[in-house]
Amino acid sequence: MKQNDRDRFASHGELRARLKKMVVENSRLDMIEQYTRELVEETRALMAADLLMEDQEAVPGRTFNYTELPVMAIIGPSGSTKTTSILRVAENLKKDYGGTPVLVVKCRSNTKTMKALQALILEGFGDPQAKEVLSRQFADRYEQDIVTRAIRKVAREAGTYVVVLDESHTPLGTTNKRDWAATIAPHFKSLINDGLFALIVMGTSDASLYFEMSDELNNRKIEGISLEPIDLRRPDHYHYFFKFVGRIDRQMVRDGIIDEPIGLIDDARSRAMVYDFSQSVPGTVSRVLIGALRISQRDKRRIITWDDIKQAFWVWKGEQVDENGEPIEIYDPWLSKPRPTTLEITREMSKPAAA
């Protein structure tokens, strides 16, 4: 391969990565940051007496009960910008507080036991004890309380007040979800009962099962966030969605990803097309645009066309399957045209306000 070709592939890959990592300011991001900051400050206050007690010398025969900490849920469908938003929030808080006030870890399908959960958190801190906890040599010596103390020490040194369990629905699998939720929820409760840090349980609607199946965990829950799919009939949803899409369009130009805006919200029909191909989920817009960018790059263009978006949408649509691997029926505005109801709403909402 010629050097020019290698340079072009590298440049194109960097631009796609830039788009994938793009975070645009939006009201949902603001709400997640507000709720997370509130949780951090509440947890700091609750932990103050515990931290003071930890600094004092141990007294023989005295046991210390840590303050029980809160748990918050952030629930939304895949593509609702949960992960992107919480990672940005964690970065912002790190700048303000120093250390790692908010640690984000991603649950896996095997995060079903307390041992696996503890190892996941230690891994998130970059602590080598994570591998030891899961090692076969440690199996006979594993004690939950010993690992809890190790996590407490690491968390205190990192200045951590909140741990986010991202993709928390993943361990539930596809069958017996309620049974798994009833099994796993006590592990979450143990973390907050032991005063380690507050939790944010983040995932799809399945993550709500943890609270449904555990009264004790539910009793620790404070007001959370529901990122429901966009309903264009609600003015607040309408304006949030199309401000989000418009900012992506403009920021792609500002960040040097493309040379000119696509025009995603230029008129009522364009808005209807975007809403319908995204299936009312904001993150789907970004995912399809990444595919459209790849198509335009292969054609050595610095602009994205609606035809690129159509081709990328068809690729994305073909990859959508349900929990059993069966294709999901996805509405296609290119084959069926925008839904009449969508077009009607975008036309009505696009009218200038009466004087």
Image: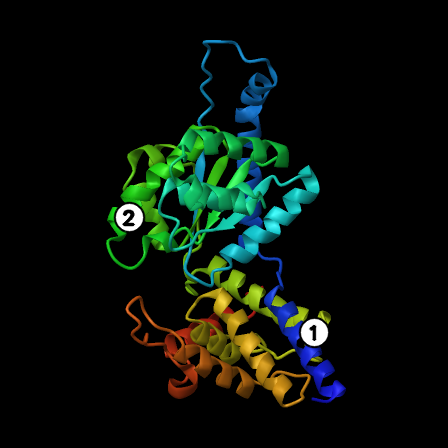
Q: Quadrant of the C terminus?
A: bottom right
Using the rendered image of the protein, determine whether residue 164 is visible from the camera's viewpoint. Answer: no
Which of the labelled discs sits on residue 66, or is there none?
Answer: none
Tell me the CA gap for discs 1 and 2.
46 Å
What is the basis of the colouring in this image?
rainbow
Q: Residue at x 37, y 38 (%)?
A: 187
Q: Residue at x 59, y 81 (%)?
A: 294
Q: Nearer the viewer, residue 327 or 224?
A: 327
Q: Residue at x 63, y 90 (%)?
A: 299
Which of the labelled discs sits on residue 253, or is there none?
Answer: 1
Q: Nearer the viewer, residue 187 or 219?
A: 187
Q: Give the structural element (helix, strand or loop) at label 1.
A: helix
Q: Give the structural element (helix, strand or loop) at label 2.
A: helix
Q: Amino acid at mark 1?
A: Val
Q: Which numbered disc flags the more N-terminal residue, 1 or 2?
A: 2
Q: Residue at x 45, y 45 (%)?
A: 135
In this view, 59 is above or below 40: above
Residue 270, given in percent of the width and then of the height, sits at: 52, 79
Q: Nearer the viewer, residue 139 or 26?
A: 139
In this view, 95 is above or below 216: below
